[in-house]
Amino acid sequence: MKVLVVGSGGRDHAIAWSFARSDRVDQVYVAHGNAGIGLTATCVNARTIEEIAAFAAAEKIDLTFVGPEKPLSAGIVDLFERRGLAIVGPNLAASRLESSKCDTKLLLRELGVPVPEFEVFSDPDRARDYVRSVGYPVVVKADGLAAGKGSLVCDEVKDAATAIQEIMEARVFGDAGRRVDIEKRLYGRELSFFCFTDGHSIVPMVAAQDYKRELDQDQGKNTGGMGSYSPHPWLTDQLVEIIMRRVAQPVINGLRERHGIVYRGILYLGLMLVDEADGMVPYVLEINIRLGDPEAQVILPRLKTDLVDICEAILSGRLEDFHLDWEPDYRLCLIAVSGRTKSKKGWYKGYPARYKIKVPIVGLDDVDPECLVFHSGTDWDPDGALITTGGRVFGIVARGATLQAAREQAYTEMAKVSFEGMRTRGDIGRD
Ligand code: GLY
């Protein structure tokens, strides 16, 4: 069969790699891909959802799988369904779970799902009054899509006032900042929890630890993710049961029963686990409608079940009793990003702030073939040299019987690669 993956990042490379492993798949296409994805699959220069649907129809694609949130939030699933094309992912109505943090928090409160104390504001003055009145550390979140950078953690009232100014008045995230969700900052253990769902049944995946902050010891700004590993040491069967009962099931059932939305695809719960007097409480920090990046780079290599079989079960509503097989070994992903570099006009601070692109990358061919290399922001220059095109450039995924072994190999292999300004966090997997 022919499979089309929509996306161009490291997660999408991992999805394409996973389909390429399937005995049932003859050809994997990716719209629009990157240099590394082109080594795994056939990249297609289709960018808009209309161009992608036209390609899928013309090429008679059997199954399309969407990696990132943007095409989902632009209604790619509704468009494919109208044209009778098989596609896995939530539809436009369901995609609001990611494209509006404010509406999602209000929905979760309505459904009785644990959320931090929060309020929603469209008036910056009222938002500032609120942070002054509560006085505790908060997280100020832009309502809309902001590539993982729209949540600003504020320990002081003055930091929160600055965040409100930047998001709502300076509009550093554009229209995503028309409203903000201001939440009480929680302290606990962050966990990215993923499920497959057909809108009725929900099958949990293994969990992953993500590292969102740019610097070691969780300092600096939020990024899309600087590294990840799986399995997650905290995720016991008992905790899975709690998350399913208190979060995943109420969300999927509530959407269907109260709002008529059948959510099909991947549900990504960004949780803060807080140990309280009556046990561990999984507070929802955010919901996403897709696999995480770089969590997918460590989860999919552990998946032994054929991804095509899973997709077919989602589309035909047969996920009930579906069993997933996983490899027990650890996988650890270390992301190389475009760091500080000098430009003609001064210094670029580097990802997640401004960074230089079109910088040659050397050494990837020397990485141990036992490791996986998933590309995020790469391209070929006219002379055939590999160059950077993004903030996150590539990830190296190592495998080990222990987290320590996977960590050591990822750092050893990363040391073989270089580009101007290349930077990694030094503490991925050092928990
Ligand atoms: N790693 C966080 C995300 O994918 O949103």
Image (spheres, grey):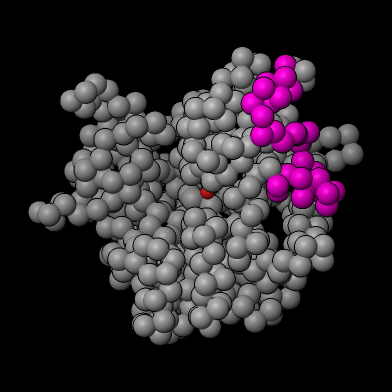
Left or right: residue 56 versus residue 36 is right
Residue in view at x 38 percent, y 48 percent: 395
As for residue 116 lying within the magenta part, the answer is: yes
Q: Which is nearer the eye, 261 or 413?
A: 261
Res. 14 in view:
no
Q: Which is nearer the eye, 299 or 168?
A: 168
Split into 4 quadrants, where in the image is the C terminus? top right
- Of helix, strand and loop, which mostly describes the magenta segment? helix
Percent position of residue 30, x then y: 37, 67
Left or right: residue 34 versus residue 56 is left
Q: How many marks?
A: 0
Percent position of residue 371, x then y: 37, 55
Per the rendered image, the range of residues in magenta is: 103-132
Percent position of residue 265, x then y: 61, 67
Residue 242 drawn above or below residue 163:
below
As for residue 260 lying within the magenta part, the answer is: no
